[in-house]
Amino acid sequence: MQDRSEPAPSARLGEADALQVGEWGRLSRVVIEHVAPSIDGGRFMAKRVVGDVLALEADIYADGHDVIGAQLAARSPGGRWHDVAMQPLGNDRWRADVELTEIGAWTFTIEAWRDPFGTWLRDVAKKQAAGQAVDLELIEGLALAHQALRHLGSSHPNADALSSRLDEAYPASGQASTAQRLAVLQRPEVVNALAGVLRDSMARHTDIGVWVDRKRAAFSTWYELMPRSQSRIPGRHGTFDDVVARLPEIRDLGFDVLYLTPIHPIGRVNRKGRNNSLQAEEGAPGSPYAIGSAEGGHDAIHPELGGIEGFARLVQAARAHGMEIALDFAVQCAPDHPWLAQHPDWFERRPDGTIKFAENPPKKYEDIVNVAFYGPSFPEVWVALRDVVLFWIGQGVRIFRVDNPHTKPFPFWEWLIREVREAHPDVIFLSEAFTRPKVMHYLAKLGFTQSYSYFTWRNTKAELTDYIEELTSAPSRDVMRPNFFANTPDILPFFLQTGGRAAFQIRLFLAATLGTSYGIYSGFELCEATPVPGKEEYLNSEKYELKVWDWNRPGHIKEDVRRLNMLRQSSPALQSFANVTFYNAWNDHVLYFGKATPDKRDFLLFAVNLDPHTPQGAHFEVPLWEFDLPDDAKIQAEDLVTGQPFAWTGKVQHMWLDPKERPYMIWRLIAPSRAQ
Amino acid sequence: MQDRSEPAPSARLGEADALQVGEWGRLSRVVIEHVAPSIDGGRFMAKRVVGDVLALEADIYADGHDVIGAQLAARSPGGRWHDVAMQPLGNDRWRADVELTEIGAWTFTIEAWRDPFGTWLRDVAKKQAAGQAVDLELIEGLALAHQALRHLGSSHPNADALSSRLDEAYPASGQASTAQRLAVLQRPEVVNALAGVLRDSMARHTDIGVWVDRKRAAFSTWYELMPRSQSRIPGRHGTFDDVVARLPEIRDLGFDVLYLTPIHPIGRVNRKGRNNSLQAEEGAPGSPYAIGSAEGGHDAIHPELGGIEGFARLVQAARAHGMEIALDFAVQCAPDHPWLAQHPDWFERRPDGTIKFAENPPKKYEDIVNVAFYGPSFPEVWVALRDVVLFWIGQGVRIFRVDNPHTKPFPFWEWLIREVREAHPDVIFLSEAFTRPKVMHYLAKLGFTQSYSYFTWRNTKAELTDYIEELTSAPSRDVMRPNFFANTPDILPFFLQTGGRAAFQIRLFLAATLGTSYGIYSGFELCEATPVPGKEEYLNSEKYELKVWDWNRPGHIKEDVRRLNMLRQSSPALQSFANVTFYNAWNDHVLYFGKATPDKRDFLLFAVNLDPHTPQGAHFEVPLWEFDLPDDAKIQAEDLVTGQPFAWTGKVQHMWLDPKERPYMIWRLIAPSRAQ
């Protein structure tokens, strides 16, 4: 023991060792990790809707070979806790299923432990099977059982009965073999009552949050319109009552959310003219996004629309038709918004004392100014904006489409959404953020219920497949619910400009089948496609002028809209987002996919020709394997456009999609057991 | 404003609103997330070796359009902090490169902020380019510049010079256009000094830890032997001096770590006999894993090996040959280990007062007992075990192979490794845990430097490709460094039992080329393959008896060992783990892959026939595209086995691998610019 090149170790690391070690000794030997869903380690909540069964999973294991137990403690929004046993799935993955019965914030804690009595039960059985002596094991097991019994407490309803049970291991007669005594401990009622009672080395994983919305948060069909364009008489400003008159038609097309662009008084200062011109022509109505004038601000209604009573009639009528009104929440103000006079310190000023217009250099937005979120009077502006939302909630509105949230502070949105949901967990916020991917995703994490997405610009088979696969995979699918808008007042995609009527049918079909929430901006169903040349904007946009539309204009695609929306309502497979599977169709212009319920009772196939100009044929695979059928099997199907039943024999079939006729097909597969 | 269905909102949510909002107002608008490497949110450290350049990346962004700045604050093990600017990579991903110049624990903090002066500089340039008036912008910019200057402070070396510079915007003459005044603010020296000085809405991400090892932690070539089997005389117990005599041969084979199975006194109580029999025959030497006897325990040396002086000679001689000794750290004790008498409360007892043997029911290990890590005298055992490691460190040992760490408490290992590294950051711990995948991975996270892996049982092309791709991807590649042992005293894989000499060449080739650390247990080079029938165990294992080997036995593969180990030493491409690319060879028995340095100056191709019984031919792709060459190009190459230079013309070539000759090929590709 000579020749040490180092001093003696115990002297070296000091006397405080024991204390330090003591702290380490209190750490659990059980690991809980890779919890799913869990967003950024519990910083944010995953999203679900009421009625969903949440599958909460985690890796759970310990060193050594002891039996492990695990449970999930679930707290409902109402504050009730209940425990759900977790089950091992193999490879140290565990799961518990929780039915989400209420809307609001749910919180979960996973607990896992080493189970000494369970370990003893397992090991003694192995030793018995191997014919080994187990006399000492019997004594050890009885001690554990009694320890568990004490832990249950004498107040436990079965305490006396269990105690008597255990005494049977040593009957008064004294006559019992070790095996007979062990059998007492191995009885199902003893095992069920005592295994899992003793919990060593408990580990906990807290802060698992899930926000549960009402069902429309995840499945909704939006129709966007400008109320002032709903008049039937050229030159007359449309009113809420004009909108009421259109409700039966919109309802019959299958929409359930009617989204109105801003309905507030429109600024007169620097008002924009036709086609976004800086000089407004005489009588120009201005952009409804330039909010506020002498007539009022964000909690007022543009006088020509019909007043708050007219709005109440619209809310009421929509509800009567099974629809809901969504309002536009756009934070910016026109220069003559009342807030500028009432609260001059809510706005940023230039060195010359003027108020700073909105800008995105070199672009300028002279008809609007932004509030200063962190100005000298912070937090008044935050509270005022929240109160705007609460005001409209007071008018019966529960859905808000938020304009450009990515240009306002992240902390503001997180605060506002929490504040509003605290009292109104049924409110839905749609984030209109066509911005960078990570910003878009972060807004969803902050709490936005639904999100605009890049769907609007995904046109090719590869683009669509990649994007849908990204959106339907974790982490996206747990926090971001895309709303597939096919067009907006600001966006007339090039594909629609150049593809004719078939392009509208194609985009409608993709939005309505791949998106659980989707929307069209009115005019889409009429195939309105006249752009500002070279731009993705509408020529003579109704954002800047009064318009009157012929809602039955020749060439419209209302029959397609109605067909697809009715199918969405009747088919459970279309009401789930992540259940899409892309199947093989050997033509890069043909996108072919299926959506099905887990039990495959609702099994739909969709095919669409992405080329609006040219007919395309494609061989494709009927997914017989999904029903455990061989490649040469026959399967019953139904053409859901024509209603025609038929059968396919064999896996590889052929389709022909002519954009002049109809660029898409929809089939229902009928599971063999049901077809008989 | 009538018809409210809810009470007035401001009354509703109470008076405490302003305070609540105030807290939200202090949150940063800048997001730092998806930091890499970051192990479980900072719970564990990623691993690197000294000299590595750490690429630390994160998503960094804010709401709005302001310019963002970010930096990394790096703290070396010596405690010095320094800042490294982070650079945007696109799509809101940022990176900083840090050269890791010291071994030990490095910690990093990312800081990111909104940059008002930088934002102003960008926006004013856009407005100037668009020909807009920028008079007010000039005043705003000057105010920001002066604010930044004040923030730098008058003690800043350039404060006076910068102040004078700014004054030039308003020359005494009074003669200057707005553009000339702006140009003052846009001068490089002003921009460099003042942009980034003002930092709004600062966000911080702390707790990024990286453990930096010495280079051998990531690149090492292990030879395992039992010292007692190194005697040349049958029946005579080998000694450390016998091991010293073998050092030149082992060094010439290219090994740099010589790993000894336990060298401690071996228990006599319940000693195992030949082939693990319960009854030891007379004179049986026992298993070296049954540690401890009257002669001493974990800090003693088996008397017949030659004493502590002999061990010191071996450590010294190994060092002189450029090799390092690794010891086996096996926590269990023989029943006659001195600790049982000295510290009876370190061990768990049965109801009859006997000490509990180790077991994994129904298997029993009668010759060893385990310490009770959480027994009544906790934490004495922990400290004692740490002191065993420190004792051998005192004898010049810096590498420990830890036996079965997964059956001892996780917190114990984390504590022990931290304690030891606190004083000795150069110590390497190899985890011998052939256990479930998540447990194996967790031990690496706890701090083990290297890990045994499933390589030993991955034989087919698909198995090898999948497993290597898993190990070379995050998160595995950042924390777990596999050591590809081809065999061990406990494991003679079926592939080696049945594949003959070619099987040994194949497994050697895979281990030495795919593994940056790999090892063989002595006898492998002799193609020793006699199993206990039906088991993956050696017949007549030297674990239970004295053996003498002919180290030049006919049929050995020492030439292959030497060739591959020399190539590992000379080729930088073989000293990185994650730089493997699997290329196409159209034969499922042929695995074909490349390893290259980032500059492609060292570009190696490897091919091996995984079928030890049958010659295999395969067409394969020469990766011309890696050098931006067309498919019909000619490329210079070298056969690294024969040393023969040659050229390939065209992408698709053919190979023929005959296991009777040599089942593998190694080529070096020569980059075109160097070939000229």
Image (cartoon, coloured by chain):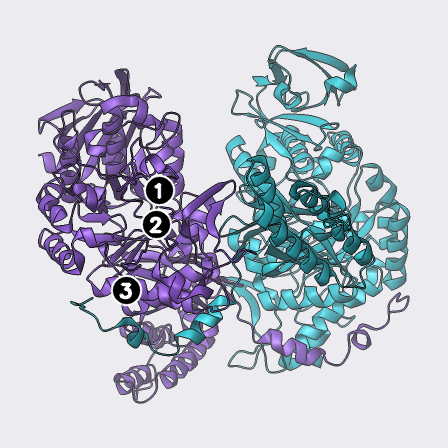
Chain colours: A purple, B cyan
Q: How many numbered tags mark residues here?
A: 3
**Quadrant (top left/top right/bottom left/bottom right) for the C terminus of chain B:** top right
Circle nearer the viewer, 3 or 2? 2
Of residue A214 and residue B355, the one placed in the foreground of this image is A214
Instruction: Kindly identify the residue that appears in the image at 27 percent across and 66 percent down.
Output: A424
Mark number for residue A425? Answer: 3
Q: Quadrant of residue A548?
A: top left
- Mark 2 / mark 1, whichever is N-terminal: 1
Coordinates of residue B228 in the picture (x, y in percent): 78, 53
The kind of residue on which mark 2 rests is: Ala
Label 3 residue SS:
loop
- Horizontal placement of B356 versus B194: left or right? left
The kind of residue on which mark 1 rests is: Lys
Q: Chain of mark 2?
A: A
Q: Give the answer, above or below, for where A311 lies relative to A585.
A: below
Coordinates of residue A374 in the picture (x, y in percent): 50, 63
Q: Which residue matches tag 1?
A: A272
- Asked whether disc 2 touches disc 1, contact meaning CB atoms under 8 Å apart, the reply is yes
- Mark 3 / mark 2, whichever is N-terminal: 2
Mark number for residue B567? Answer: none
- Horizontal placement of B317 versus A409: left or right? right
The kind of residue on which mark 3 rests is: Pro
Cα–Cα span, label 3 and label 2:
30 Å
Q: Chain of mark 3?
A: A
Circle nearer the viewer, 2 or 1? 1
Label 1 residue SS:
loop
Mark 3 Cα shell of 10 Å, populated few (<14), some (14-19), many (≥20) = many
